[in-house]
Image (cartoon, helix red, strand yellow):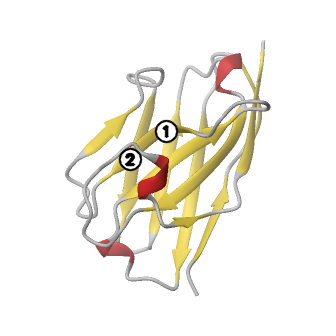
Amino acid sequence: QVQLGESGGGLVQAGGSLRLSCAASGLTFSRYPMGWFRQAPGKVREFVAAISWIGGSTSYADSVKGRFSISRDNAKNTVALQMNSLRPEDTAVYYCAAGPQFGGVVQRTSAYVHWGQGTQVTVSS
């Protein structure tokens, strides 16, 4: 059974930083592209960042480029999202997700097959 578990969320002031982590089990992690998504109250879930299964390619939403960084450690079955210069509009529940085996780096929510339960990030102004 595939399980993805996010951690690292919390409350931070605008301009601060947080590092989210996602631990994966039940799958051959190194075969899966990984993504981070977020969903704010009353809004649809949106793409944040993704990384290829090897880790050589990344993709970011325009709203987070230059502030967020995605990375992965295939030896530890983890993917991380470093978030700097946080803004109140970054407030959301953040989810990690696994794409199809050997798939490309994509931004479509529908392309991801396994999802975590999410972790809350709140940025105060």
**Is label 1 in contact with label 2 (beta carbons under 8 Å)?**
yes
| Left/right of residue 90 with respect to residue 110 in the rendered view | right
Q: Quadrant of the N terminus?
A: bottom right
* Residue at mark 2: 50
Tell me where residue 92 appears, x and y as whole percent: 71, 35
Tell me where residue 46 appears, x and y as whole percent: 55, 36
| Left/right of residue 45 with respect to residue 53 in the rendered view | right
Q: On screen, 123 above or below 10?
A: above
Tell me where residue 20 appears, x and y as whole percent: 59, 48
| Left/right of residue 98 with respect to residue 94 in the rendered view | left
Q: Residue furthest front?
A: 110
Q: On screen, 119 above or below 102?
A: above
Image point (32%, 38%), residue name? 59
* Residue at mark 1: 47
- The mark tally for this picture is 2
Q: On screen, 84 above or below 116?
A: above
Tell me where residue 107 appears, x and y as whole percent: 39, 42
Image point (40%, 63%), residue name? 99
Image point (36%, 68%), residue name? 100
User: Label 2 is placed on what type of residue?
Assistant: Ala
Judging depth in this view, the residue of 65 and 75 nearest the camera is 65
Element assignment for label 1: strand
C-alpha distance separating marks 1 and 2: 8 Å
Eye-nearest disc, 1 or 2: 1
Q: Residue furthest top?
A: 125
Rendering quarter of residue 101: bottom left
